Image: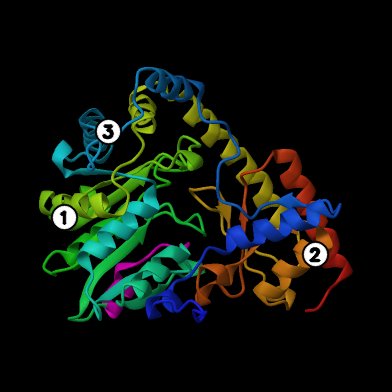
Amino acid sequence: MKSIHAVRLAERMSRLGTESAFEVLARARQLEARGKSIIHLEIGEPDFPTPANIETAAVRALRDGYTHYTPAQGLPALREAVAAYVSRTRGVEVDPDEVLIGTGGKAILYIVLTALLEPGDEVIYPDPGYPIYESMIRFLGAQAVPVRLREEAEFAMTAEDIAAALTPRTRMLIVNSPHNPTGGVLPREEVRRLAQLLADRDVIVFSDEIYSRILFEGEHHSLFSEPGMRECTVLMDGYSKTYAMTGWRLGFGVMPKELARAATQLTINVNSCAAAFTQMAGIEALRGDQSAVDAMVAEFRRRRDACLAGLRSIPGFRCQQPHGAFYMFPNIEATGYRSRELQEALLNEAGVAVLSGTAFGPNGEGFLRLSVANSLENIEAAMTRIRNWMLAHPRA
């Protein structure tokens, strides 16, 4: 009889992280299934439908036969649309051959980091920050170098902090603005200082700009647009957040042609291509009516303002005003509770699903992340539940 052995996973799997938002969502759903009322402020996806013109374009594409393989780099028409969009919004001319279409922003992140990083390379990234950055860095055997985003700096990455983290082994800097989980936005002067700092260094910048259209004040400023940065920056953007297309799995990267060729070869080996009909919908998203995006951002701003007022009324909470994305990142140190402890209590007892700041790195301790991707009515109800629970369970 053949022996049965336990599955032996590769060692690198032990270095792979996760996204706590999906874990908390699953537990919240379990509580709901048992009859508990839960208000969901944990998951980071717009609660709006995909705009009708985009859906119509996808249906038309299906009926027109866009159900087969496409070039691995993406349909030429979509790469042209992306190149024109980035040229217009970032003020830098982009060639379609510099564009890679991926199955979401995560695919671009994974493929670019896999193509560029060697074991031992150092990668600077924000902490708190999107947890998949650290996960991918460690998975590939590179050295994760977190840089703390400070509340007093409105959670903006600063050139001073990056300069302190740079070493001869630094291979990449990951920048995210507007920022998940804090809603912080890089001001123009800081973008320019970062560009000056990196001008004479052999460092690749991975600029995650997936929230670039979700801004409440000011304008979006990208390192990609700065003199001298075009040749060493990978710009990642996509459709999930701006167009409420999380389930469509469509994103794009803009990068030097040599890297785009290598990334295309890797795409062939990983997933062949993005779905043809979603790519056709992506053309309509960029070129079609943008009123749904404007309306969504206006509603997120209204919810941000209401949530900010609510959080500031809760004993022991303080909160910076986020300028972009759709997250709140209140400081809860004065409550006397640890972040994970309060996350669990609010879920199980108050019926509000939020995330511990530590889901985004060790420097998230003392904070919670709340998503305002829920109705204004539910956000206000959540603030009441949290406030009442805190009043009934004081610790500080």
Provide residue 48's location: percent of width, then percent of height. 58, 34
Give yes or no for residue 162 being in the magenta stretch: yes
Provide residue 61's location: percent of width, then percent of height. 37, 22
Residue 306 visible to the viewer:
yes
Name the outermost residue toward the front: 1
What residue type is disc 1 on? Answer: Ala
User: Tag 1: Cα neighbours inside 10 Å, few (<14), some, or many (≥20)?
Assistant: some
Q: Would residue 178 be found to the left or right of residue 366 on screen?
A: left
The residue under label 2 is 348
The residue under label 3 is 85
Q: Nearer the viewer, residue 162 or 209?
A: 209
Question: Quick one: quadrant of the C terminus?
Answer: bottom right
Q: Could you tell me which residue is drawn at 62 percent across and 47 percent down?
A: 372
Q: Is residue 329 above or below residue 11?
A: above
Magenta-colored span: 154-165
Secondary structure of the residue carrying tag 1 is helix
What residue type is disc 2 on? Answer: Asn
Give yes or no for residue 309 being in the magenta stretch: no
Secondary structure of the residue carrying tag 3 is helix
User: Tag 2: Cα neighbours inside 10 Å, few (<14), some, or many (≥20)?
Assistant: some
The residue under label 1 is 262
Task: Using the rendered view, name the quadrant where residue 276 is placed.
Answer: top left
Are the two marked residues, 2 and 3, in contact with CB atoms closer than 8 angstroms? no
Residues under labels 2 and 1: Cα distance?
Answer: 47 Å
Residue 193 visible to the viewer:
no
